[in-house]
Image: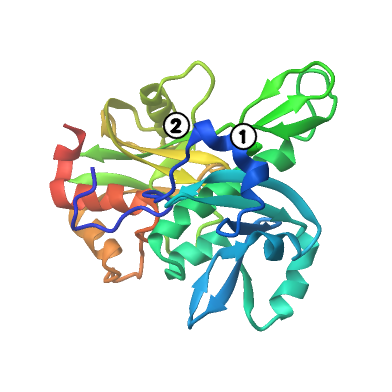
Amino acid sequence: MPTSSTPSFAYIGTRLDRAAERRAELESALTRPDTRAYVICGDRVVLHKRNGALSPLFPVAEAAGMGAAGEQVLIGFDGGAARIAQEIAADAGEALKARGDLQVRDLRGIALEGALPPDELGPLAIAKALLTWHARHRFCANCGSPTTASEGGWRRDCTKCSTQHFPRTDPCVIMLAVAGDRCLLGRAKRFPTEMWSCLAGFVEPGESLEEAVRRETLEEAGVRTGRVAYFASQPWPYPMSLMIGCFAQAETTELTIDRKELEDARWVSRDEARTMLDHSHPQKLFVPPPLAIANHLVRAFVERGAGVVG
């Protein structure tokens, strides 16, 4: 696990009490003066400037009046005060940005720039993921009829066949294969120039995490792995994933790269990985920032070497 000397992952450590037993209180929460809303406009977050700082929290009436209001979800309680997620139409974004007191920003950029305190990122991750789920499940997968939200937004019920639908999280393994004093990094075409990261892929049906790690490493880079060691996990609301970080013991080192999945892959020594972490690499190569679990996988390898696999 990450040590206390390393930065925390983004989107974890929320102070909210999810209080599943109180989710039916959404309607009454909307009328309480201390309830506050996180506003999601399309796939972006609305922030306001207050006392020289940015905040994602709005009074309920103000949040609902920012644009065509959609779903409302009770995501938890903070010190007894309800916190909801408010969806508004994406086309309201330009008008909101024109106001001098508001910003409409991408959640990834907010986390990367440290624009909000870390304990506000977790509630925003919940809000964004849940509202994305609602937007994609307006109709029943069983019979095709419309669905309606219930349980404070944590369930959708079919209006015809009564099937109950619950939010889903997509498990994704992100792994660092290790061969002695080297680790395996890859580059996707969508990455910023010179950025390298851990390999990753979605867990398939009927597959364990260990099997997913071995399969993805073999498919993407042609490297066979044996022992798999769990590291940590991180919610990744892009849109509804859970990144499950692992180390894998490489049994082969020859690379056969799947160019449809990766632009390139390479073995990197601990010393080189260290320069990629501290941005002193002679070719300006770097790894993802500390908000991402990939950074911490590489950091743990730099600190502990092959011992990360156990």
Q: Residue at x 73, y 18 (%)?
A: 163
Distance from the alpha carbon under mark 1 to that under mark 2: 41 Å
Q: Specify whether 99 is left or right of 1.
A: right
Q: Residue at x 46, y 71 (%)?
A: 115
Please tell me which residue lies in front, 77 or 234. 77
Assess whether mark 2 and mark 1 are in contact (beta carbons under 8 angstroms).
no
**The disc label shown at residue 81, or none:** none
Q: Quadrant of the C terminus?
A: top left
Task: Say which residue label 1 marks.
Answer: 24
| Total numbered circles | 2
In the image, what residue type sits under mark 1?
Ala
Q: Quadrant of the N terminus?
A: top left
Q: Residue at x 61, y 39 (%)?
A: 25
Where residue 10 sits, quadrant-wise, is bottom left
Please tell me which residue lies in front, 196 or 54. 54
Q: Residue at x 64, y 32 (%)?
A: 151
| Residue 9 sits above or below residue 96 on the image | above
Where residue 256 sits, quadrant-wise, is top left
User: For numbered disc 2, what is the local secondary structure?
Assistant: helix
In the image, what residue type sits under mark 2?
Glu
Please tell me which residue lies in front, 7 or 305. 7
| Residue 308 sits above or below residue 189 on the image | above
- Whole-percent x and y of residue 75? 55, 45
| Residue 136 sits above or below residue 40 on the image | above
Task: Say which residue label 2 marks.
Answer: 216
State whether residue 8 appears in this view. yes
User: For numbered disc 1, what is the local secondary structure?
Assistant: helix
- Whole-percent x and y of residue 159? 82, 24
Nearer-N-terminus badge (1/2): 1
Q: Specify whether 214 is left or right of 136.
A: left
